[in-house]
Image: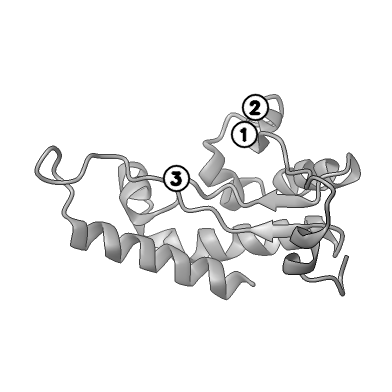
Amino acid sequence: MATRTFRARLEDARPIVAVGSVEHALSNRTHDRIELVVLQAPLVLEETMHAFVEAGAELLCTPTERASRLWLAQLDRADRVYELNRKAVWIARKAAAHRAFVVGVIGPPPTMLQPIGPLSTENLRRAVAEQAIALLDGG
C-alpha cells in the first residue's frame, strides 16, 4: 500500500474497508475521553488502531472528531489542540504501517451557530483551520 495512492485505490472496484469505532474498542481498555486518549494513553490507541489494520481495515480515521479548540475548551485543554491533533495523525500512521490510509477527522462544533446558538461563523472558521493545520502537519 505504501506506493499506491489513495486516488488509485478509489479507482479500484473493490469496496474500501474502513476502521470500526475506535471509541467503542477503547471503552474496554480505558475510561479516558477518546480525544484525550491521544495524550494520556497513546500506546493503547496505537494498539487498538493496529488491530483494525490487522483485521483488514484500509482506512484509519483519527480520533479527533471532538479535538477542536471549541470542544477542548470544555475540558480546559484548548491549549493542546495542535499537539493532540498532530499526535493523533502520527499514532494512526504508525498503526497503519503503510498498510492503510489515514484520514484526519474534523467533527461538528459543540454548539449551534448564530443566530440559533452562540457560535459565530468566524470562530468556527478559526477553530476548523487550526485543527486542519495540525492534522496536516501530522502527516
Q: Secondary structure at mark 1?
A: helix
In the rendered image, the residue lying farthest to the top is 28
**Which of the 4 image quarters holds residue 138?**
bottom right
Mark 3 or mark 2, earlier in chain? 2
**Which of the 4 image quarters holds residue 123?**
bottom left
Answer left or right for 106 relative to 46: left
Q: Secondary structure at mark 3?
A: loop
Q: Quadrant of the N terminus?
A: bottom right
Q: Quadrant of the C terminus?
A: bottom right
Query: Residue at the location (56% across, 35% down)?
Result: 32
Mark 1 or mark 3, earlier in chain? 1
The local crowd at label 3, few if under 14, some if 14 to 19, many if 20 or more residues have their Cα within 10 Å, is some
x, y percentage for residue 40?
Answer: 59, 47
Tell me if residue 76 can be seen.
no
In the rendered image, the residue lying farthest to the left is 115
The correct choice, above or below, for 16 with respect to 124 in the image is: above
Residue 23's disc number: 1
The correct choice, above or below, for 44 with respect to 86 in the image is: above
Answer left or right for 83 relative to 96: left
At label 1, the amino acid type is: Glu
Q: Which residue is mark 3?
A: 66
Q: Secondary structure at mark 2?
A: loop
| Between 117 and 39, the one nearer to me in the picture | 117
Asked whether the beta carbons under mark 1 and mark 2 sit within 8 Å of each other, the answer is: yes
Residue 27's disc number: 2
**Which of the 4 image quarters holds residue 88?**
bottom right
Query: Residue at the location (31% across, 40% down)?
Result: 110
Answer left or right for 116 relative to 25: left
